[in-house]
Image (spheres, rainbow, N blue to C red):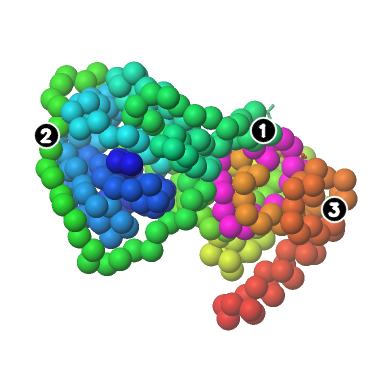
Amino acid sequence: MNTWVYIDHFKGNVIPASWEAIGVGKTLGHVTALVFGSGVEALAKTAFEYGADEILLAEDVGLADFRAEAYATTLSKLATEQTPDLVLFPTTTRGRELAGMVAIDLKSGVMVDVITLDVTDGKITITRPIYAGKLLTKETCSAKPQIITLRGRAFPKPAQQVGRSGTLTKVSAVPGDFPTKVEGYTTSEGGVSLTDAGVIVSGGRGVSNNPALTPPAGMDDKQTELWRAQQGFALVKELASALGAAVGASRAAVDAGYVSYAHQVGQTGKVVSPDVYIALGISGAIQHLAGMRTSKVIVAINKDPEAPIFKLARYGVVGDLFQIVPALTAAFKKKMGK
Ligand SMILES: Cc1cc2nc3c(=O)[nH]c(=O)nc-3n(C[C@H](O)[C@H](O)[C@H](O)COP(=O)(O)OP(=O)(O)OC[C@H]3O[C@@H](n4cnc5c(N)ncnc54)[C@H](O)[C@@H]3O)c2cc1C
């Protein structure tokens, strides 16, 4: 099978799920990596080190910023000329947008957020979660090329083989007066890369529930809640830092103003698949589970033994997080020599 893999990158950093997609392509046959941008040749060559046999590099000032129309026009033209069997994208915002546009151009369909992929007699069958992760659906697509976005961390990342090389072909971008113009970027919050994290420590509404803490005098109820949440999230962050983990949160914690939206996990937040997900003071509402149920090991600490999160957790601790988390952090720090 001749597979194309779209390498998603931003400001010189490749989204690791692109390498995972190369790994999937290699199990099916020949892999061509597609790298679009400006000044990205060095970045493109890394695709060889993750297993790409060939690279199609489109460099143009018009591709300097990701703009779906410009990228899709070039990708669709290449695919029309060279007829790959399969085009893989990482399930990122850019990957989803581009896959949808290319599918329309090529009169194909898209199977999004795929977590398993099997090939029998040249026919691909995929699995993907639907209804907020409550059900898994099996699907096939009869059109060619088949277009699929792969959920990050659902497939293994191939080992990097430094110095590995292959055939790099420079291709032209399709010029056009595309309506989208990028005006600039602003950082929402630094340091949070939930979707790439191997370990995530998340806090929920329970993180503000430590009545033993006496707030400074003169605070009203809301200020007291936020002050307590700040103390509670300090524990979440300390445990995350001891484990080299990213910090996540439930929507209740985000809506109440404990942490920013960039941390939210769930149906209306980020969908994550870490090796370990530690839920602190999170009840496990279906909308939260939708964002983390494919985590490989789930650990929950909650003082309510009936909390739904325990139905999904591999390890559950029924108790007060304010007593358990500091002890856990100290134990991890000791174990990891920190
Ligand atoms: C359309 C829609 C979209 C949504 N999207 C999302 C989403 O993307 N992500 C999301 O998370 N939610 C989402 N929600 C909200 C979701 O339904 C829940 O309201 C939310 O997940 C609850 O957050 P929580 O578990 O932090 O709070 P709660 O449900 O209030 O749970 C707090 C938990 O903390 C425990 N606790 C309290 N004190 C302690 C303590 N000292 N020690 C240990 N445990 C303690 C309690 O026992 C309880 O289980 C969405 C809802 C809707 C309707």
Residue 135's place in the image compared with 142, above or below, is: below
Mark 1 crowd level (few <14, some 14–19, many ≥20, 10 Å Cα): few
In which quadrant of the rendered image does the C terminus lie?
Answer: bottom right
Q: Which image quadrant shows ligand 1? A: top right
Q: Nearer the viewer, residue 271 or 87?
A: 87
CA separation in Å, label 2 and label 1: 43 Å
Q: Is mark 2 within 8 Å of ligand 1?
A: no
Q: Secondary structure at mark 1?
A: strand
Q: Is residue 214 visible?
A: no
Q: Sequence-wise, which precedes: disc 3 or disc 2?
A: 2
Position of residue 309 in the picture relative to residue 105 (left or right): right
Position of residue 109 in the picture relative to residue 52 (left or right): right
Q: Is residue 2 visible?
A: yes
Q: Residue at x 79, y 57 (%)?
A: 316
Q: Does the magenta segment cover residue 279?
A: yes
Q: Which residues are magenta?
A: 268-290
Indicate the quadrant where residue 293 lies: top right
Closer to the eye: label 3 or 2 = 2
Q: Secondary structure at mark 2?
A: loop
CA separation in Å, label 3 and label 1: 29 Å
Which residue bears the numbered disc 2? 172
Which residue bears the numbered disc 3? 303
Closer to the eye: label 2 or 1 = 1
Indicate the quadrant where residue 76 lies: top left
Which residue bears the numbered disc 1? 135
Q: Is mark 3 within 8 Å of ligand 1?
A: yes
Q: Mark 3 near mark 1, Cβ–Cβ under 8 Å?
A: no
Q: Sequence-wise, which precedes: disc 2 or disc 1?
A: 1
Position of residue 72 in the picture relative to residue 139 (left or right): left
User: What amino acid does circle 1 point to?
Assistant: Leu
Indicate the quadrant where residue 271 lies: top right
Q: Which mark is residue 301?
A: none
